[in-house]
Image (tube, helix red, strand yellow):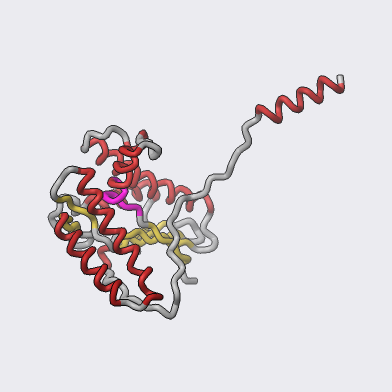
Amino acid sequence: MADIAFLLLIFFLVTTTMEVDAGISRNLPLKRDLDVQLPPPEIHDRDILIIMANSKDMLYVEGEEMLIENLEEKVREFYLANASGNDVNDKMPSYSTITSAICQQNITSILASQASAPEAQKSLYDPEIQKWEDKLATLRVLGKSSYVEISGQALIQLKNQAGTTYGLYIEIQDILKKVVNDLRNERCRELGWGEYSELDREEADDREKIEALQVLIPERIIEAKIEQ
C-alpha cells in the first residue's frame, strides 16, 4: 500500500498543472541620467484622460463621478472621437497625418541633433529615431502613402488612493486593456488581416502586422497615487 500511495503521489505531482501568477504588462520609463535634460514635450489637457479611484471605490473620470459600466464607452470615445482625421471634438486628442516624407524629415532632423550632441546624450535620441522608423515600417506594412494617428502625447492617467480595493483596480485595468484589444481587432479586420488576437508573433509577417497595429492603436497608460 505504501508503494502504491507513493506512485500515486508521484503521478499527481507530475500531471498537476501549477497556477502561475500573471502580471499586468506595462512599459516602464527608461532610467536616465538626471544631469542630462531634454526639453519636455508640449502636453495639452485634451491629450490626457484622467481616471481616478478613491479609497471608497468611487470612480471619477475627468473629475466627474462615473459608474464603472460607463468607463469602456468613455475610453473608446477618447480614442475614436477624432479618428476620422477631422478635429470635431476639441476635448479629445487630435489626429495627424503621417507620410513617408514626414518620417524621413524627422529622422534626418533627429540624427543631426544627435550628431551634434555630447557623447553622453547621444543615446537619448534613439527612442525618437526608433519611433519614426516604426511609423515608416507601418506605412510599408499598410501599403499606403499615408495614415492618420492619434496625438503622440495622448495617454491615459490612472490614479488610485492607497485604500482602493484590488477588485476595482483590476476591473479598471481590464476595461482599458479590452478597449485597446477591441480597437486593434476592429482595425485588423478592416485591413483584411483577420483577428488581432490570432496573429502569431513568431511569424515574421504577423509580427509586422502586430507592430503596425500597435502604432495605429497605441496603449499608453501611466499610474500615480492620488494626493491625500
- Nearer-the-camera pick, 29 or 115: 115
- Which residues fall within the magenta stretch? 213-219
User: In the drawing, does residue 202 fall left or right of residue 92?
Assistant: right
Instruction: Name the spot of residue 117 as percent of width and height, x first.
Output: 32, 77
Residue 201's image quarter? top left
Instruction: Name the spot of residue 6 as percent of width and height, x first.
Output: 81, 25
Number of disc labels: 0
Q: Is residue 215 magenta?
A: yes
Q: Which quarter of the figure is the N terminus placed in?
A: top right
User: In the drawing, does residue 122 fall left or right of residue 20?
Assistant: left
Q: Which residue appears at 17% of the width and 64% of the height?
A: 105
Instruction: Name the spot of residue 88 as percent of width and height, x first.
Output: 14, 56
Please identify the residue farthest to the right as the structure is shown.
Answer: 2
Q: Which residue appears at 15% of the width and 45% of the height?
A: 144
Q: Which residue appears at 47% of the width and 61% of the height?
A: 160
Q: Is residue 205 magenta?
A: no
Instruction: Name the spot of residue 119 as percent of width and height, x first.
Output: 38, 75
Q: Is residue 7 above or below residue 92?
A: above
- Nearer-the-camera pick, 134 or 108: 108
User: In the drawing, does residue 49 fall left or right of residue 86?
Assistant: right
Q: Is residue 56 above or below residue 120?
A: above
Residue 132's image quarter? bottom left
Q: Which residue appears at 20% of the width and 43% of the height?
A: 142
Q: Is residue 91 above or below residue 112?
A: above
